[in-house]
Amino acid sequence: MGERHILLVEPDPAFASLLTIILQEEGGHKVTTVPSPAEAAQLLSESRFDLVITEAFDQRDPFDFDPAFLSPLRAAGGDVPIILFSTYVQDSALRSGHFGLADAVPKPFDIDDLLRKVNRSLRPAPNIS
């Protein structure tokens, strides 16, 4: 499939480093990491990414997922697929297609499941002739 560019939106530096290692070494992808949706939206408006993986931001109620934080990412990224990475993905409450997500990965996570969902969700590579 070749190297694809993933934007990782994760406020925890240690977790961001772990995910970056997995996505680069196991998945063969280029990863850019930012800690906030605002910074992600800025990058999405300036650069091309094949996928966004984001933590669930601004959640005030663990029983009522609020997708509002996704709006700036969608506005800046257009058709770039988004995977949600969160503890809110429990009991199949969130999954592919919900809230326009390409997919969702629960915490704690399985590396093989993460890589499978990433590869399935990646935007098709541009046709370079």
Image (spheres, rainbow, N blue to C red):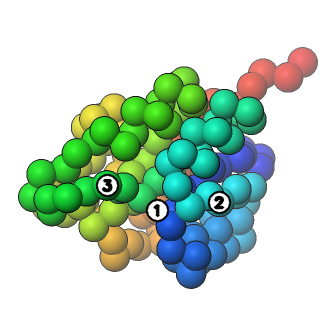
> Marks 2 and 1, Cα distance to the nearest angstrom?
17 Å
Is disc 3 in contact with disc 2, using a CB cutoff of under 8 Å?
no
Residue 123: % across, % down: 59, 33
Q: Which mark is residue 65?
A: none
Reading the image, the residue beneath label 3 is 58
In the drawing, does residue 41 fall left or right of residue 97?
right
Q: Is residue 26 visible?
A: no
Q: Residue at x 56, y 61 (%)?
A: 35
Kind of residue indicated by mark 2: Thr
Instruction: Tell me if mark 3 has few (under 14), some (14-19) or many (20+) residues whose alpha carbon lies within 10 angstroms of its own.
Output: few
Whether residue 47 is situated above or below residue 25 in the rendered picture: above
Q: Residue at x 64, y 39 (%)?
A: 42
Label 3: which secondary element: loop
Label 1: which secondary element: helix
Determine which quarter of the picture holds residue 23. bottom right
Q: Quadrant of the C terminus?
A: top right
Reading the image, the residue beneath label 2 is 33
Q: Residue at x 15, y 62 (%)?
A: 62
Reading the image, the residue beneath label 1 is 114
Whether residue 63 is situated above or below residue 52 in the rendered picture: below
The mark closer to the camera, 3 or 2, is 3
Kind of residue indicated by mark 1: Leu
Residue 41: % across, % down: 57, 39
Determine which quarter of the picture holds residue 97. top left
